Image (cartoon, coloured by chain):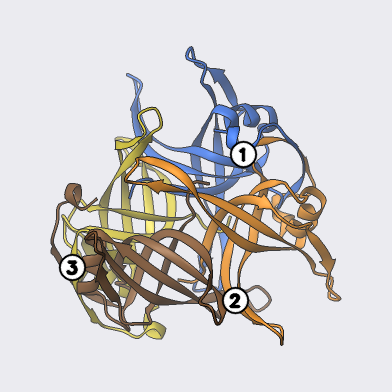
Chain colours: A blue, B orange, C brown, D yellow
Amino acid sequence: MKEQRVTVTGLVATTPRHLVTQTGLPITSFRLASSLERWNDAEGRWETGETNWFTITSYKTLAVNTAMSISKGDRILLAGIMRIRDWDNGTTTGTSVEIEADTIGHDLTLGTSVFTRTSSPSSSD
Amino acid sequence: MKEQRVTVTGLVATTPRHLVTQTGLPITSFRLASSLERWNDAEGRWETGETNWFTITSYKTLAVNTAMSISKGDRILLAGIMRIRDWDNGTTTGTSVEIEADTIGHDLTLGTSVFTRTSSPSSSD
Amino acid sequence: MKEQRVTVTGLVATTPRHLVTQTGLPITSFRLASSLERWNDAEGRWETGETNWFTITSYKTLAVNTAMSISKGDRILLAGIMRIRDWDNGTTTGTSVEIEADTIGHDLTLGTSVFTRTSSPSSSD
Amino acid sequence: MKEQRVTVTGLVATTPRHLVTQTGLPITSFRLASSLERWNDAEGRWETGETNWFTITSYKTLAVNTAMSISKGDRILLAGIMRIRDWDNGTTTGTSVEIEADTIGHDLTLGTSVFTRTSSPSSSD
């Protein structure tokens, strides 16, 4: 499998952090809480399940537009490549599940959105 | 496999048609053109590939918000359940590929969006 | 979206056809019937839904191993890139939904399998 | 999103552990190492990327057939529901990424398999 693709919906749980690297690459990242339901076969109904937490990162035009459009508390959907990373900051260690998004949008299940086009498909990346 | 889920990005190719059934169910549907790239292994680069055409349908709150937010020409992403249907209108026959979307959003790869929340997660459906 | 990926389970509905092109490329293809269930929200249960039909194609090592392993009537799972194609054979026209598989396996939900390795990960592609 | 579905290919990294609960539920679980490639846009080629580690669990008929068919070192594909879990064993804490598989098969990209059917679709779960 070349890439591990996933599609996720959820709540933007932190204020998106936007920065531009010294080489001029725009990056936007935030934490996403994705609350799932779980099919209870015995009782024949969906019930509240766990929450999956992801670190979402976007680059280039998507990073710029995400920083201008997405705020903490928004409900979104996105698709991208998932990587499971072990980290060690010297004091503690942990595992984070990261998604490099190649498309992000506000989830119209929960509201309306007004869209302004900023680039053509060919120039976008 | 209980359901055939897919995630798609593309161009809204027809003006979304919104209606409410006699039983009060809101439905919004439109055609989506999803242009794909194709990895050329011999030349080691992505090249323009085919366009997949889908009929997208949404129901309830998502149908209402989609009708208020999405216009012909917009770039969107969505996820939902795919069904391949043979149809026969008496004169000609054909096959359509339908997706019942459970989440839709404007694709921030190509622009910015301003979101207005209209419902809470629990009341949405 | 660079590629439209899907994952499908289903029944091999035709005897797989295996050929090698003049340039030496092995190709195996067959039809797959994927019967789905559908969540009935009103009655709170899964019910029998439609059957999605796909044309599955594989290339190179996967084509060779598929031809040696898969028979009509087998239950399988696979993942790959989906393309919706309109065809015209001069007499009639139609639409087919094709998946170029990059991985295929017997579905262990319905039986057991004995595996024999034929190639290393690095040489297979 | 009701469920977080993913499709994964990879190497079975531990001997599958099979048990039957006191209530008679068969469970099989193992660790899967999924090595990914990464598209290097600058150099225009795929390169070796990270390895994602998953804990795979299956139940009922799939658990029985998996225990009879899958060994450490096998290459497989599977699809299922992903959950990201924080754990605490009293001494240390960590995060594991679990997939409850609803279909598993040997990956024919790397070998051949001989299949023996053990149950009908309707009786499988």
Q: Is residue D57 above or below residue A89?
A: below
Compare residues A65 and A123 and report the one nearer the observer.
A123
Check the residue under mark 3 and report the chain it is in: D
Compare residues C48 and D45 and report the one nearer the observer.
D45
Q: Nearer the viewer, mark 1 or mark 2?
A: 1
Structural distance between the alpha carbons of marks 3 and 1: 42 Å
Compare residues B34 and B43 and report the one nearer the observer.
B43
Q: Are marks 3 and 2 in contact (CB under 8 Å)?
A: no
Which quadrant would residue D110 be assigned to in this image? Answer: bottom left
Residue B90 point in image, percent of width and height: 71, 87
**Do marks 3 and 2 share a chain?**
no
Check the residue under mark 2 and report the chain it is in: B
Q: Which residue occupies 64% across, 59% down?
A: B102
Residue B28 point in image, percent of width and height: 76, 62
Which quadrant would residue D61 be assigned to in this image? Answer: bottom left
Crowd around label 2: few <14 · some 14–19 · many ≥20 (10 Å): some
Crowd around label 1: few <14 · some 14–19 · many ≥20 (10 Å): few
Structural distance between the alpha carbons of marks 3 and 2: 34 Å
Say what amino acid the circle numbered 3 marks.
Thr
Residue bearing the label numbered 1: A121
Residue bearing the label numbered 2: B85
Say what amino acid the circle numbered 2 marks.
Arg
Find numbered disc 2 in the image and state the secondary structure of the residue it sits on: strand
Residue bearing the label numbered 3: D112
Find numbered disc 3 in the image and state the secondary structure of the residue it sits on: strand
C3 sits left or right of A120 in the view: left
Compare residues C55 and B114 and report the one nearer the observer.
C55
Find numbered disc 1 in the image and state the secondary structure of the residue it sits on: helix
Q: Which residue occupies 61% across, 39% down?
A: A121
Which label number is shown at residue A109?
none
